[in-house]
Amino acid sequence: MAAEMSAHPNTSETAKPWVSWLLFGIIGAPMALAYFIYATGWGIPTGTVNRGDLLLPATSITALNINDSQGSSLNLWEGKKRWRMLIVGDNYCADQCRDMLYLTRQVHIRLGEKARRVERVFLNVDGNYSQELLQTLQRDHPKLVAATTSLGEWQDTLASTNGAEHQADGARVYLVDQEGFAMMSFDDGHEGADLLEDIKRLLKYSYED
């Protein structure tokens, strides 16, 4: 019996090296793959998730002196927290400016029930509204907030960002988060679907007040 036992070693002992190799493969292989991807960049997408242009660094606009269309002080940050589509323009509001007003209105409508979490603002850097522009906004964009600030203040706000050269002609819309940080912009090179996709994604991953 002793001879038979010595001729057939314990199978659990012979399996131990295989168990060790298996554990090494389970733990070590993902680490090796992660290092390879990090070192070579292989498999990492070259594009970014967002479709708009990132404003770097994201910049708070809460310190801006903002008035309503009648010249009274306006605090956009009171009440419920909202995301904002901010069109920065002037009284002239040429074709591209009007296109942005139309685009943001359509995006707002397409948000459906989520539209209540987003507000549209036209920020007039001329400091006050011409009657023509104000009447146009009230007629065609009744849910839009008509606000004013000075061109100098707006330029100072963007001075230390990569948007310092942006023209305040209404041809660009800024996406502003719930805390008042301008973080992304869209110009006439973007489509409404780009703005809609970015807003929907941000609403999905942000808190609701």
Image (tube, rainbow, N blue to C red):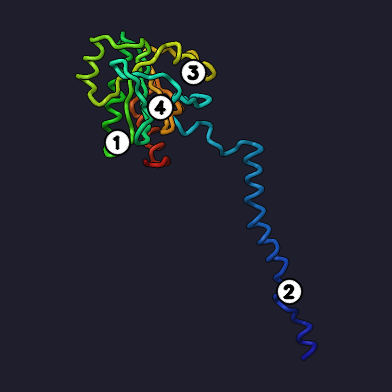
Is residue 184 positioned above or below 134 on the image?
A: below
Depicted 85 relative to depicted 89: above or below: below
The residue carrying mark 2 is: 13
The mark found on residue 116 in the picture is: 1
- Is there a contact, CB below 8 Å, between mark 3 and mark 4? no
Q: Residue at x 38, y 15 (%)?
A: 149
Is 197 situated left or right of 7 in this image?
left
Query: Where does the N terminus fall, quadrant-wise?
Result: bottom right
Q: Nearer the viewer, mark 4 or mark 2?
A: 4
- The residue identified by callout 3 is 158
Residue with the mark numbered 4: 175
Residue 174 x/y as whole percent? 40, 23
Report whether 192 appears left or right of 157. Answer: left
Dot 2: what SS? Answer: helix
Report which quarter residue 12 is drawn in.
bottom right
Estimate the x, y position of residue 104 in percent, counting from the top left: 31, 25
Count the labels in the image. 4
